[in-house]
Image (tube, rainbow, N blue to C red):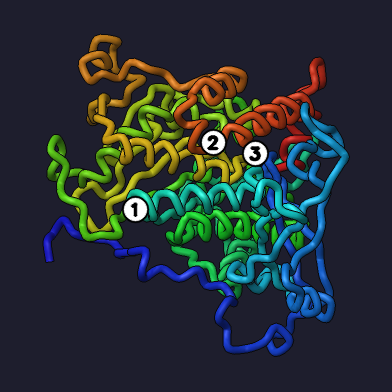
Amino acid sequence: MSATDFGVEYTPSTVYAGTLSDAPRTLEELGVKFVRIHWLDLCNQLSCHILPLPYFNKVLKSSRSGVALPKSVFTLVGSTPAEGSSAEGEYLVVMDRSSLRLCGYAPGHASLFGFFEEKAPIGGRLDVPLCPRTNLRRILKYAEEVLNIQFLVGFETEFTLLKSTNPLEVVNNSGSCTTTAFGTGSAELKILEEIADALAKSGIELQNFHSEGGTGQYELVTGPLSPLEAADALVFTRETVYNIAAKHGLRATLAPTLHDGGCSSGAQAHISVHSTTGRSPPSNTHPSLLTTLEYHFLAGLMAHLSAVTVFMLPVPRCYQMPVDDEFFAQGSWVSWGLDHRGVPVRIQHPSSPKARHFEVRMVDGTASPYLVLSGLLSAGIIGIRDKLALEEECCGAQGTAQMSERERAEKRITRQRPLDLESARKCLVEDRELGELVGDDVVKTFVAVNKTLENALQPEGEDEAVTLARLVETY
């Protein structure tokens, strides 16, 4: 074995979602009394209907097992309709039995996700493009059937534990990876241990947990899965965190930068690219570092990163974070590096082919993983499909913010990502190539909803403490 070859190897054929889709025991035998049908809207708010098990079993026997929801589900922000919203019509949320899990955080409950469908075909089709899960599934199908590629995705979940939201009071002042964040008998240790136990009961692989750089902040790292399964698992992990923190009288929040100059609460996405027709050959320009597929995927990420930014950083406070801190930020320049934390995209474990993957560091905890992956993977797919050349050079040991303008120009690092929410929305709208793959209707509706969300989260002239309290109580 090579000294540079380390880490656990995951492949699309070996990962397992850990759901109950092929469990030998019935839900009754597992002690389930209620089943939650979950869906995530375009504001990254999780909702559900809870069905008693006897009725759930009846629904399963129907030809299209699901529940009806108003079509405004994707255009409402709370009770405020976004532009284009209508009170007319209903969708059917058809249950995806392959996503069924035990709710480790709620004994006696199981949960699953669904795919939104029209009640009757429109233009010969039942699927609803605005459904984030349906849209991601479509993009993945295109990648596999047309380009012979698959992806694995793992996520980090960073969150802060609060004693109160207004005034804002964190649970402790511990720093990154300190043992003081896990004092024996402390509420923090009990919460993290219960989260770990609950995720195990739910079939989600937890690789590690530790305290993070912000005060009262913690991180969970879960294992890679196929993109749709990974997005489901992240949503489920967040719900687990919220519920177990609440059980102990604390509020867990994914909101970014709770203090001026503070750390974000990220959901960094770890992505690997796999050919379905055999191992991809080394790239011509970076043969020891990137396969041909990885090279073109990275080129696509760089080309379309600005357009995807609003999916990853969807709320105003995301843009109040320090962007060019070399250790705790993601960088403002469209760039990439090797195991470098000060860039938006870094290659982790570059010397180990079996563990090597891309980490996209810009994903915020307030972001919907379905929208994030639809954007990021579409960008990479465009790079692979069109065989895009990678313009930017590796940033090297020095972060892009610490470089001079001349040094950045020498590495062809010349573009900054959008640094405010309105600019981020504009970049998405103007990237027609990305919009075509993600879906023009998805882009149009998301932008309208995001504008309404911005106004709802940050009313003009409001006291900042009230605004921040609303944010942490929403996310």
Query: Which mark identifies residue 312?
Result: 2
Residue linked to disc 1: 149
Image position of 378 (left or right of 171): left
Q: CA distance from mark 2 to mark 1?
A: 23 Å
Image position of 250 (left or right of 446): right
Q: Secondary structure at mark 2?
A: helix
Question: Does residue 291 appear in this view?
Answer: yes
435 up-or-down from 117: above or below: above
292 up-or-down from 322: above or below: below
Write the residue at 81% across / 66% down.
50
Write the residue at 45% across / 59% down.
226
Residue type marked 1: Ile
The mark nearer the N terminus, 2 or 1, is 1
Nearer to me, 178 or 435: 435
Q: Secondary structure at mark 1?
A: strand
| Residue 93 on image: x %, y % | 73, 58
Q: Secondary structure at mark 3?
A: loop
Nearer to me, 366 or 304: 304
